[in-house]
Amino acid sequence: MDSKHRIVVGLSGGVDSSVAAWLLKRAGHEVVGVFMKNWEEDDGDGYCTSRQDLVDAASVADVIGIELEAVNFAAQYRDRVFAQFLHEYRAGRTPNPDVLCNSEIKFKAFVDHAKALGGERIATGHYARLAVGERGVELRKGADASKDQTYFLHRLSQAQLDGTMFPVGGLAKREVRAIAREQGIPTYAKKDSTGICFIGERPFREFLSRYLPTEPGPIETAAGDTVGRHQGLAYYTLGQRQGLGVGGTRGAATAPWFVAAKDRSRNALIVVQGHDDPRLYADVVETGAMHWIAGAGPRGRRFAAKTRYRMADAHCTLEALAPGRWRVRFDTPQWAPTPGQYLVLYDGETCLGGAVDARSGSRRRGNRVGARAPCRAGARRGGLTARDRARELASDALASWRQAIPAATSCYQENRPHVIRWIRRALMIERCTTFDSTPRCGGNRQAIPGVSRATSDRQRVS
């Protein structure tokens, strides 16, 4: 870039933004550093690092030779990011506030402040690259694939990207640290920040309990057995392993437990054993309105997508269901897609945009735990009639039964109560599909061998 600009750099106190500022200064630009304070509460409890981060940012500015201003965006953060964060958790979803922080604070409130300072452009230490293509400014992955941050930037618009620079986007992390060390930048060895900024290293459940009430309930297996108690569905996310408080059960496998579903109607947390349990996988994700970085959707239907930041891109097909509703079908099942998280689409190295995961797992590699099949034959749920959905669940239940029976006779005897329970549930679902007009299974149901009528009325697939 030949022309020189007045550039306002978001100086966080970390090594990436430090080197970004140094690179711009070396290139001859007039650089001004701004430290953003986005959280005011708990500054003195040892978990929030903003005070030390400001000290580090000031040290960096002094070494580089630039001005530094500290700006308080806590009010904007609370209104635009944290309020939505709590709303999503109350609704049983798992949000990602870092995405909103970028679109609402770092590339909106910060941009407005930079303009007030006379800034012509802004710059940050994100690992991403920009290029001009046929459809405007394109957001491309950082050169260091292990540090690429386009997932968190996918909600930016053309206007936001047009005046932005990512100086370290073409470098590897080790190169960034090497530059910092060579130039005497004091943050060269500083540990990367992880997690949500306003939570820090504080236990997540402890923090969330300040704002959301605890609502204890049962922790159940996919078979319906209670194996523990949870403190509130909001405190758990799909795929979670740590902090469940579920130990081993007699006669069961010793594999670790994972959260597979939340049954909000019964306030039950459903868990399964083993990272590769089929109930943790889904090949279909439905979303709400899609944000397109180019302003409009691309041509074609075949792309790549990821449902979590650290997951690899996976080939998929994009389908429009209705205005503001999309369905993404993955070629291979994805591990624990989670409502509330973001599904981000890519075309090679270019980030296209994304949307919030509104409903995951409409087609799982195994039985879908925590779901109840409606018995009205003509009613549709997720694109399937109740009859088709019930048959699908019955097939899944029988598959789970076969999976649970070991070859050894002794193991079979130990699992016999669970086997019988699964068979009964499968039979009840198949029986349910024979009624064309009865809204619930209790009306004209015939007796199922080995199951009393009173028991049948209680037992439904969960």
Image: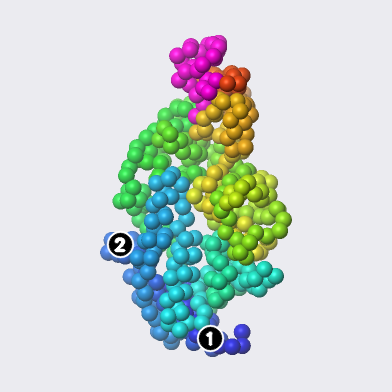
Which residue is drawn at the image coordinates 44% and 44% (left, top)? Answer: 92
Dominant SS of magenta comes to loop
Q: Quadrant of residue 433?
A: top right
**Is 400 colored magenta in this rendering?**
no
* Highlighted magenta segment, given as a residue range: 438-462
The relative height of residue 173 versus residue 58 in the rendered view (above or below) is above
SS category of the residue bearing label 1: loop
Which residue is drawn at the image coordinates 37% and 35% (left, top)? Answer: 217
Tag shown at residue 5: 1
- Its colouring scheme is rainbow
Residue tagged 2: 41
Instruction: From the top left corner, tell me how far across and down residue 85 is, in percent.
Output: 41, 54
Estimate how packed mark 2 is, as few (under 14), some (14 to 19) or many (20 or more) residues with alpha carbons within 10 Å. Answer: few
Instruction: From the top left corner, tell me how far across and down residue 302 is, in percent.
Output: 70, 53
**Residue that extends furthest to the left in the rendered view of this protein:** 44
SS category of the residue bearing label 2: loop
Which residue is drawn at the image coordinates 51% and 76% (left, top)? Answer: 123
Instruction: From the top left corner, tell me how far across and down residue 68 is, in percent.
Output: 39, 81
Q: Nearer the viewer, residue 230 or 245?
A: 230
Which residue is drawn at the image coordinates 56% and 37% (left, top)? Answer: 279
Q: Nearer the viewer, residue 197 or 358?
A: 358
Left or right, residue 424 beside residue 214: right
Kind of residue at disc 2: Glu
Mark 2 or 1: in front is 1
Left or right, residue 158 beside residue 192: right
Q: Quadrant of residue 141?
A: bottom right
Q: Nearer the viewer, residue 325 or 371?
A: 325
**Is 443 colored magenta in this rendering?**
yes
The relative height of residue 10 versus residue 93 in the rendered view (above or below) is below
- Ranked by sequence position, the earlier of labels 2 and 1 is 1
